[in-house]
Image (spheres, rainbow, N blue to C red):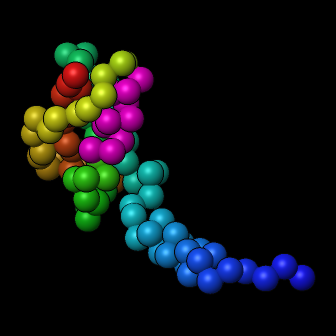
Amino acid sequence: MPRLSTLHFFSYPIIFLLTACGTLQSDFRVVNQSDGMIGVQAIKGAKELEAQELAVSECKKTGRSAAAISEAKTTHNDQFPMIYIYQCVR
């Protein structure tokens, strides 16, 4: 039976905890707006940094490398009460 090294023994729980602490990607909705902006609708309690990561990945699909926040506002949508608007840059 192979022995697990100390590094593996401690790294698996840390990786699990880091992935378990974030908001699920299904708790966001990405919207490409007609003016080129990226809207990320989020559940209550979601972090803006998580929304920005999704916006950056959407911007990379268009050849841009980053996303700058333009505005954050509340909505009347019960499922996604926050929307973050980003502009793709670079």
Residue 10 is left or right of residue 35, and the answer is: right
Relative vertical location of residue 43 with respect to residue 56 in this rendering, above or below = below
At a point 10% along the width and 35% down the height, the residue shown is: 70
The answer to which of 10 and 44 lies nearer the viewer is 10
Residue 18, quarter of the rendered image = bottom left
Relative vertical location of residue 42 with respect to residue 35 in this rendering, above or below = below
The magenta region covers 52-61
State whether the magenta stretch is mostly helix, strand or loop. helix
Residue 1 is left or right of residue 77, and the answer is: right
Relative vertical location of residue 30 with respect to residue 4 in this rendering, above or below = above
Q: Position of residue 48 (x, y in %)?
A: 22, 53
Q: Position of residue 4 (x, y in %)?
A: 73, 80
Please say whether residue 57 is one of the residues in the magenta stretch: yes
Q: Position of residue 66 (x, y in %)?
A: 26, 32
On the question of residue 42 being in view, the answer is no
Quarter of the picture containing the C terminus is top left
The answer to which of 28 and 48 lies nearer the viewer is 48
On the question of residue 33 being in view, the answer is yes
At a point 52% along the width and 69% down the height, the residue shown is: 15
Please say whether residue 86 is one of the residues in the magenta stretch: no
At a point 36% along the width and 18% down the height, the residue shown is: 63
Q: Position of residue 19 (x, y in %)?
A: 48, 65
Residue 67 is left or right of residue 32, and the answer is: left
The answer to which of 88 and 3 lies nearer the viewer is 3
At a point 39% along the width and 35% down the height, the residue shown is: 57
Residue 17 is left or right of residue 71, and the answer is: right
Q: How many marks can you see?
A: 0
Relative vertical location of residue 75 with respect to residue 35 in this rendering, above or below = below
Quarter of the picture containing the N terminus is bottom right
